[in-house]
Amino acid sequence: MKQYLVFQLYAPLASWGEEAPGEMRHSATVPTRSALLGLLAAALGVRRDEEERLNNINQHYHLAVHALSAQDRWLRDYHTVSAPRENKKYRYYTRRDELCHAPDEVSTLISQREYRCDGYWHVAISAMPGAPYSPEELRDALLAPHFPLYLGRKSCPLALPLAPRLITGTLKEVLVQASQEITATELTGFTLNEGMCYWDDPAETSLAWQQQQRSNNQPLSRQRWQFGSYTRFSGPLQGEA
């Protein structure tokens, strides 16, 4: 039995960034680990340049996501982006570094952003030994976040309260209870299904995984914009464990 911090995420648009080597910036179907950890850090008031504090958060929590919405709609947005011409003699570390180093060499690139429409998720977080913040402290931060919160991009603000609460049980019991507590007002306009669950705790036994994938969404360094890999499991909430 564990104590979990559970909260909901909903917005008309969400963009959960994935690897984007080309002009198309795809979105994952569910919140990524890096996005959720960033949301927690923003709520706690941890700044992007506080790398030691960020890394301490990134390494000490297990995350699980329950996809609730049955809708599967997407939107693409057209963008133009300023970028410098390739310069093998100089190494850029930040976006500002790119644009300020040689402003006369900046050109315009075409790109597209992908957004998930009307996604609705429950997130369950458990703390590992040595976690810098207790579930209670995380809950309080989500109730009164230090920085504005959004779902992947600043153009994707929250459309429902996070409604964070502490629930004790197995991960399956916690997610089932959370889905049963959704109010009629929150259900307005939604078609809900039992949904798939995604989690990163290899010791989880209350849910039966159908797939395990390597994901490159484990933050390593915010300053260098580096990410590592981890194993993500997925399976139905009502499957036999």
Image: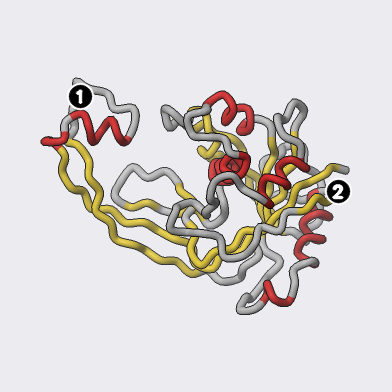
Q: Is residue 229 left or right of residue 155?
A: right
Q: What type is the residue that disc 2 sits on?
A: Thr
Q: What is the x, y in percent for residue 155?
A: 43, 58
Residue matched to label 1: 88
Of badges 2 and 1, nearer the viewer stands: 2
Which circle marks residue 192 in the picture?
Answer: none
Q: What is the C-alpha distance between the residues marked 2 and 1?
A: 54 Å
Residue visible at 19% across and 37% down in the picture: 84
Number of marks in picture:
2
Crowding at label 1, few (<14), some or many (≥20) Cα neighbours within 10 Å?
A: few
Instruction: Measuring from the top left, give residue 65's x and y in whole percent.
Output: 66, 52
Identify which residue is drawn at 56% across, 60% down. Answer: 158
One can see residue 134 in this view: yes
Element assignment for label 2 = strand
Query: Which of 86/132 is in front?
Result: 132
Local SS, label 1: loop
Residue bearing the label numbered 2: 168
Query: Which residue lies most toward the bottom here?
Result: 189
Name the side, left or right, on which 99 lies relative to 11: left
Front residue of this view, candidates 140 and 225: 140
| Quadrant hosting residue 224 | top left
- Look at label 1 and name its amino acid: Lys
Crowding at label 2, few (<14), some or many (≥20) Cα neighbours within 10 Å?
Answer: few
- Where on the picture, by quarter, is residue 3? top right
Q: Position of residue 40 (x, y in %)?
A: 62, 43
Question: Which quadrant of the figure has residue 1?
Answer: top right
Q: Which residue sits at x=44%, y=60%?
A: 115
At x 57% / y 65%, what residue is drawn? 159
Q: Residue furthest left?
A: 104
The way the protein has been coloured in the rendering is: secondary structure
